[in-house]
Amino acid sequence: MTEYTLIDVDSHITESPGTWVDRVAARHRDRVPRVERIEGRDIWLIDGQPATPVGPTAPAGWPEPMPTMPRTYEDLLPAAYDAKARLELLDQVGIWAQLLYPNVGGFGGQRFLKLRDRELMYECVRAYNDWQHEWASADPTRLVPVASMPFWDADDCVKELERCAGLGFKTILFTGEPHRFDLPYLGEGYWDRLWAAASAHSMPVNLHVGGGEFNWDTRRMEQRGFAESFALEGLTLFHKNGQQVCDVLLSGLLPRFPQLRIVSVESGIGWMPFAMEAIDYQFIEGGGFNSRPEFDRLPSEYFADQVYITFWFEKFAIRELVGQAIPVGNVMWETDFPHPTCLYGDIHVRLDETFAGLDGDTRKRLVWDNAVELYGLDVPVSDSALTVA
């Protein structure tokens, strides 16, 4: 008997070596992502060039401290890449359902831009979505795929969203900063057809940390060491997603699409109170209400109705800010498994520390109810503790 008390809104799948080469035309197989073992490491190549090693996106359970990482698939936990093993892990932890995000294509799909071929780029997105749909079929109620989007083309985004909605996908992934790739800003009318389609299908739009411009400072790492560089890079990514949330709130797209729901994934939550106060102040001082007639309230006031954020390691923000400066109904819990700073092994100990002093209703909302309601997840009952044979 397993007691399920958790919904995890952010995990990643380590893609299978055949994810792309098995799903595209033969003429494309040398260009799409594929794995080669180079000097004892499994490396993903895109267009024949090294893109990312397998190990750094799945070190959960790896016995050595960073910066050492697993080198091959054989070094990884099977739950990183095998759906049956993933379900067994979820059973052990008491996680009922888990949302699934990518690695190889980038956390917003931006690595596919390297191909510089619109048809092939779209084929890579389609192949990935088909693969994760098949992977999640091991238990589609509990393994929840997130549809990647060909974000470089709004029409193709709508086409892929409609296709994935037909397959049963509940939610989509999008970059939080398309302007970094010489595309229109989030608030431009160019994207309205996408927001309209997402709203029509009740599919939340997820902005995953690292899904936009993502340039690792190799000079700092070489001169200052891994720990300093890793900490600062992580903080930079969290702050960038905070900026993307502010962009969404200031863009005007939420007043135009009141049914649209946006999620900032893996950004943490402690930055939010200052950011909300700052954008409201700047908006008013800048004469926003005079020049932006679509706003009938402050930018931050759209947050409670339409924007969500996630956490995994924070304690202070959960105890001191949630329910006061941060609406309790807009916060969800994640593990980020199997990434470097994920929750793994001692999850319930960490959760008990995080929730010390909080009432049971608040805890249940953060680790269960909010995710079930937002993503329309299928759960056996609505009680906080679910026991399933």
Image (tube, grey):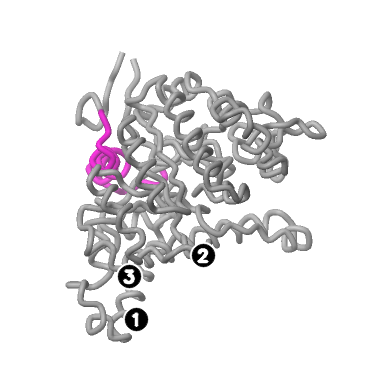
> How far across and how far down the image is residue 202, in percent?
24, 44
Are the residues at dot 1 and dot 2 in contact (C-beta closer than 8 Å)? no
Question: Was residue 360 drawn as part of the magenta stretch in this picture?
Answer: yes
- The residue located at (45%, 30%) in the rendering is 130
Vertical order, 16 against 245 (above or below): above
Q: Is residue 354 visible?
A: yes
Q: CA distance from mark 3 to mark 1?
A: 11 Å
Vertical order, 49 against 142 (above or below): below
Q: Amino acid at mark 2?
A: Asp
Q: Which mark is residue 182?
A: 2
Could you say which is closer to the camera, residue 336 or residue 54?
Answer: 54
Relative to 236, 173 lies left or right: left
Q: CA distance from mark 2 to mark 3?
A: 20 Å
On the image, which quarter does residue 217 sit in?
Answer: bottom right
The outermost residue toward the right is: 39
- The residue located at (62%, 37%) in the rendering is 32
- The residue located at (46%, 25%) in the rendering is 135
Q: Amino acid at mark 3?
A: Leu
Q: Amino acid at mark 1?
A: Gln
Q: Read off the magenta span.
A: 353-378
Q: Which mark is residue 282?
A: 1
N-term mark: 1 or 2: 2
